[in-house]
Image: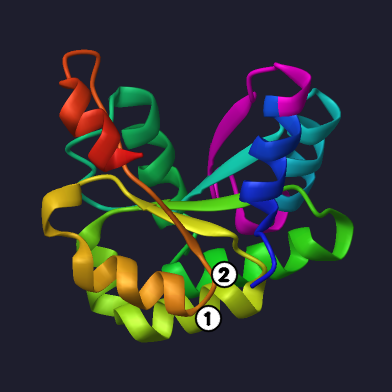
Amino acid sequence: MQPTRIQSLFSALRQKRRAALVAYLTAGDPSPARTPALVAALERGGADLIELGVPFSDPIADGPVIQAGSERALKAGTTMRKVLEIACEIRKLSQIPLLLFTYMNPALRYGLEKLARDAQAAGIDGCLLTDLSVEEAAPYVKVMREAGLDTVFLAAPTSTPERLELVA
């Protein structure tokens, strides 16, 4: 299987002994139509990878900035489907790695298999479900990997070496 854009990026950065600049953007904030241009600006500004946030009505794990962005994007009509359409538009302009940043609830509501298939078709390279524990992720990981998508999990500064290895 060919490496994903995310895998290729980190391989190249390792060779250069350089860290990645990962930028987050709530898709649809301030409007769905503006998001591709904002991604292009982030890329011109030096971003190596874009976390494309799916707005969610209850982003409990996120701070006030992402919460406000989610609220504006939802008011602008942004849905999971719309974020995938935005990814298609981004792919017309760029090959920057795209990581879908969302929660378990929207992913389950959309359907994991459908999400994996549609995300891959839209040019998404991987998914980060911010509230999914790596210990409970086997079914999700299987579906995503079968679609050729990377999976990303979060770690805290207090994570043990054993947990960091599991997350990695």
Residue position for label 1: 118
Does residue 21 show up magenta in the picture? yes
Q: Which secondary structure, mark 1?
A: helix
Quadrant of the frame with the N terminus: bottom right
Residue beneath the point at 18% across and 21% down: 159
Does residue 54 show up magenta in the picture? no
Residue 108, horizontal then vertical, whole percent: 23, 74
Q: Which secondary structure, mark 2?
A: helix
Residue position for label 2: 84
| Span shown in magenta | 15-34
Between 134 and 22, the one nearer to me in the picture? 134
Scheme of image coloration = rainbow
Quadrant of the frame with the C terminus: top left
Q: Amino acid at mark 1?
A: Asp
- Is the C-beta separation of discs 1 and 2 under 8 Å? yes
Q: CA distance from mark 1 to mark 2?
A: 7 Å
Residue 107, horizontal then vertical, whole percent: 30, 69
Residue 151, horizontal then vertical, whole percent: 41, 55
Between 126 and 38, the one nearer to me in the picture? 126
Residue beneath the point at 81% across and 41% down: 40
